[in-house]
Image (cartoon, grey):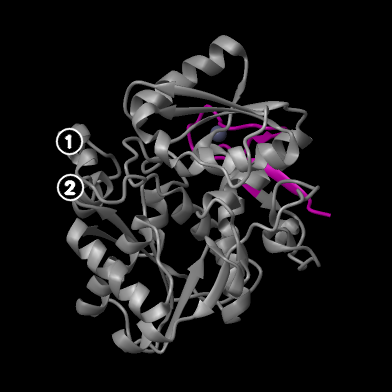
Amino acid sequence: MGHHRIICPQCRREFSGYALSCECSSLLKTEYTNSLELRSLPGLWKFLDWLPCQNPLDTKVGSVTFRSIGLGKELGLANLFISFSGYWPERGAFNLTGSFKDLEASPTVARAQEAGIEALTIASAGNTARAFAHVANNTGFEVYLIVPKSYLHMLWTPEIPSEHIHLLTVDGDYCETIEMAAEFCQLNGITPEGGAKNVARRDGMGTVMLEAAYTMKRLPDHYFQAIGSGTGAISCWEMANRLRSHNWKGNPVLHLSQNFPFIPIYRAWEAGRRQILPDDLQNARECIEGIHAVVLSNRNPPYSPTGGLYDALSTTKGKVYSVTNSDARKAGRLFEALEGIDILPAAEVAIASLLQAVESEYVNSTDHILL
Ligand SMILES: [Zn+2]
């Protein structure tokens, strides 16, 4: 059984149910008292021991990791591994909504159901709402999706939408949508899903690191990801630390990328600051409109809090990259030509950052790299 405690890493207070935050404002963390035994379950549910829920949903969501042949050869990297969290049945990837958000939505709904919660509110720019809509269709769990009107085209479901999906659109940007969602939760007494603060979301996403480590039979030396909020990067860092505490060797360096001109985390990290300042977010609206990977547009990422991105980058001696639209598109075309699958814009940004890292010799040809 998956035995876990939810604690505040700063004051060590313990929480129960669907807790999302402590007064300390550090990110709550799950501590698993058991070691990880792989289950005979599909997708990410085989890691149920290290998910904050007991009952798997009837889904096959999960990530797959495979050794790159084409791109690795092109870049002279002998041990380049690719984590894929989309839909690619030939490779065993069944995320029907096409993004890693499926990894977050399923454990979140399982956790909420076990805590006696009947509905969640989700503010999203697209991918997350899509993933939760899909889970709602499959489980009958109620979701209230709050989405900017201009991003509506990103909200589709693999099946005919059921009555369990409630959609509200906001005439504003993602940031205003988040504010509206908070108000909606308060007025209607519906639990907010929680975003980066939600341990189920982070541990679900952290299964990317578990899947990779079990495939590679070791922890990677480097982990590359494009970030909006950076929740995925925090999740993989946390999961690597769990594996380390169970005698797995290594400490993956985080290589995180943002899409120029919207690069607040890049600016703060380059300046050696723990805080994102208003200057880092100057002309945010115009900058967001100018980026290729629109999902990388979070204005309030969990960068500063204890256990957040700054800590993850500091303790892994990580790097942050700024990637232009044309470099991202170029990297995407290269990937499709060499690996035979088209990818989402955010993944193109991550690949462009790997090209920068190779160019700058931040990685060695025999290092184990997870992309
Ligand atoms: Zn605390």
Quadrant of ligand 1: it is: top right
Pick whichever of labels 1 and 2 is earlier in the sequence: 2
Q: Magenta residues: mostly which secondary structure?
A: loop
- Secondary structure beneath disc 1? helix
- Secondary structure beneath disc 2? loop
Q: How many marks?
A: 2
The residue that mark 1 highlights is 286
Residue 238: mark in rendering: none
Q: Residue at x 20, y 56 (%)?
A: 325
- Whether residues under marks 1 and 2 lie with C-beta atoms below 8 angstroms apart, the answer is yes
Q: Residue at x 84, y 55 (%)?
A: 1
Relative placement, left or right, of 91 versus 39 is left
Q: Nearer the viewer, residue 222 or 263?
A: 263
Q: Residue at x 55, y 50 (%)?
A: 97
Where is 335 relative to 107, above or below? below
Q: Which picture quadrant has residue 317?
A: bottom left
Query: Percent from the top left, x then y, of residue 75?
Result: 30, 84
Q: Nearer the viewer, residue 330 or 211?
A: 330
The residue that mark 2 highlights is 261
Name, please, the residue furthest toward the top. 187
Query: Percent from the top left, x then y, of residue 332?
Result: 31, 67
Q: Alpha carbon of mark 1 to alpha carbon of mark 2: how far?
A: 9 Å
Magenta region, residue range: 1-30
Question: Can see residue 27?
Answer: no
Q: Residue at x 75, y 34 (%)?
A: 113
